[in-house]
Amino acid sequence: MRRRRRSLLVVTGALAALPMTSIAAGADAYGASVSAIDNVFGPDVVRVQPGETVEWTMDGRSAHTVQADDGSWNSGDLQPGAEFERTFDEPGVYTYFCAYHGSPGVGMAGTVVVGDVALPSARGEVGPGREEPPTGFADTIRVPQDEPTIQRGVDAAEPGGMVLISPGVYHESASVTTPFVTVRGMDRNRTVIDGDFERANGIEVFEADGVTIQNLTVRDHLLNGVYWNGVHGYWGSYLTAVNNGDYGIFASASDWGQIDHSSASGSPDSGFYIGQCDPCHVVITDVLAEHNALGFSGTNASGDLAIVNSEWRLNMSGIVPNTLDSEELPPQRDALIAGNFVHDNNSTTADSKDLQYPTFGTGILLTGVRDDQVIGNVVQNQETYGIAVLPNLDAQLWVTSGNEVRNNVVEASGRADLALGAPAGGGDCFSGNDASTSAPPAIELLRGCGSFGAAIGGGDLAPTVNLGTRFLDALDGAFPHGDWRSQPGPPPQPSMPDAAGAPPRPAIAEQTVPQPYRIRPVARIVRASDVDPTVGKELTVFGVPLATSWWSLLIGLYGYVLPGFLYAAWITIALWDLIRQESQPISFRARWMAIVILVPLLGPILYFAFGRSPIPRELRLMLVVGGAVACLMISGLAALLGG
């Protein structure tokens, strides 16, 4: 589903390090992408439209093949790093396998569904818009009493029924294609689905609406712990996901859902992920994320998305909604992040993919997003930024706009408690926060909500450059991180009340999910009484840490001083031209110098006047960038004059 995902802040490297070179690939032309890692395809089921292409990438350490069950096509041997593509023109269901690690329908095998055809399942056919909510409850299937395995149990279940799993360790992976079933463990900590570092997903729900998964632990899978894909209605409650090789608890291209009372740890991408939905109609509440690369990642997850009342700690970074062209439905917008305790997300022992590393040490990071609200959170002990709003670059540059950061408590951040990175569009604002430092300085005075400064865009180059240096440092994969297979798990977690006796709870969109919630006030967030004394101000040069690497020093100096040089050059050329015009009257020369000085301000003025108008997006982007450059020129000149 993610084709060479450049997750987060590629913009920082491109803007700060390679200003004349585009490093972003073109928009994703593929219908789907499948990663072949050691002994599994992930995802193992994808749906594309006729005429679209599926790409397989060999991302493991072993050779594989991709060949049709009926022998009609075959990739041949594919070594690590190789790719294979096939275009599917006719609707249908196409099954395939790897000859080295599977056979038709067994082991390393997968399915491509083309068009809007139904996906065969044990209980009939499922697919887009085919399922109707049940009118009552169906029978409960007990595992292992009625069926020996979880997979046999979900295959036997009817819509409205439940699969009730006794305590024990189940060495398997389950795929659910029956709608409106509830899969529940009897004991959250002792009902364990173990992937043994061999199987792809703990529980995968593909295009089956209304599936609820409750009260169990999924661990040691090569891809995801619990995964909903392409569903309308889902619910995950009292779940524990530990040391899974991609995401812990994951929903993609799905809407009307809720995840609550759950924990996720040890994921090299993110513990919790919501992606590619607009509007999402999703609530994440009362969850714990720790020892992940990102606590939460939400690519292009927009509209009625609430991330509330939860704790995000000991990850490499905390909460990171973001925009990417390489996934559907950009940009990310209209999310609420409120009532959270976000702290100590500075881990160098959590595992991470190389392009997650640039987010290191940031509590809440909005990248390339619009109209998000970050309200009433407590953010402590972050080595880089407490709350940061930054642009992102994929196939195109996504500047931020319309985001509100209000009434948060932010303290003990290594570089700044609050940050707005350049270039930024109009409407990003900061008000009522209990914070000590910001980039740019005096951010609430200059960019308070409702102020002229917030409306004109701009931002500070230093936060963008700071993360850009980490992007370059991560290219060789030598950044500090651990191994996802050996991350510490959480202590025993509270189990669902009356798991054995409570009736099934199918996730019926707009009826049972999402549940109403109330945001807890800042005063009720239990937090550290003292901030971490090891997190303090780093020695910096122009907003960049002094010599953390040669990239840091070089790019920091270049990125900060360049606007001043450009402005000085502009003034110098104008003065030289003025000298040549000594015969002109003083009034003419005065008008000329006024024009010279005011031209750099045209970007902000034009954006303020026209940036919200229905003019072409490309022109709006030019106005935003022009405004940012103008602000940077002025700030650079002020720095040079003021020392």
Image (spheres, rainbow, N blue to C red):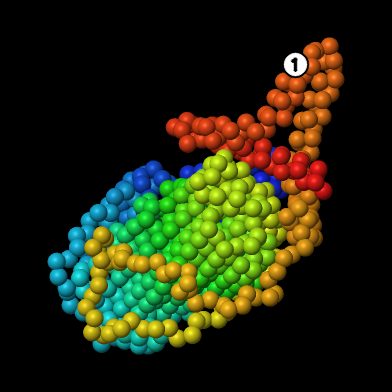
Q: Is residue 538 above or below residue 583?
A: below
- Can you identify the residue that label 1 sits on? 588
At x 53%, y 76%, the residue is 527
Frontmost residue, 269 versus 399: 399
Marker count (numbered): 1
Residue 46 left/right relative to 539: left
At x 48%, y 31%, the residue is 616
Frontmost residue, 127 versus 508: 508
Mark 1 crowd level (few <14, some 14–19, many ≥20, 10 Å Cα): few
**SS type, badge 1:** helix
Position of the N terminus, as image quadrant, is bottom left
At x 35%, y 45%, the residue is 50
* Residue 447 appears in the rendering: yes
Q: Is residue 367 above or below residue 285?
A: above
Residue 260, image x, y percentages: 38, 71
Q: Is residue 637 above or below residue 158?
A: above
* Residue 86 appears in the rendering: no
Residue 106 left/right relative to 270: left
Which residue is outermost to the top?
583
Residue 401, image x, y percentages: 51, 46
Residue 86, image x, y percentages: 45, 49
At x 58%, y 43%, the residue is 453
Hey, which quadrant is residue 275 in on the image? bottom left
The amino acid at mark 1 is Phe
Hey, which quadrant is residue 495 in on the image? bottom left
Residue 175, image x, y percentages: 34, 69
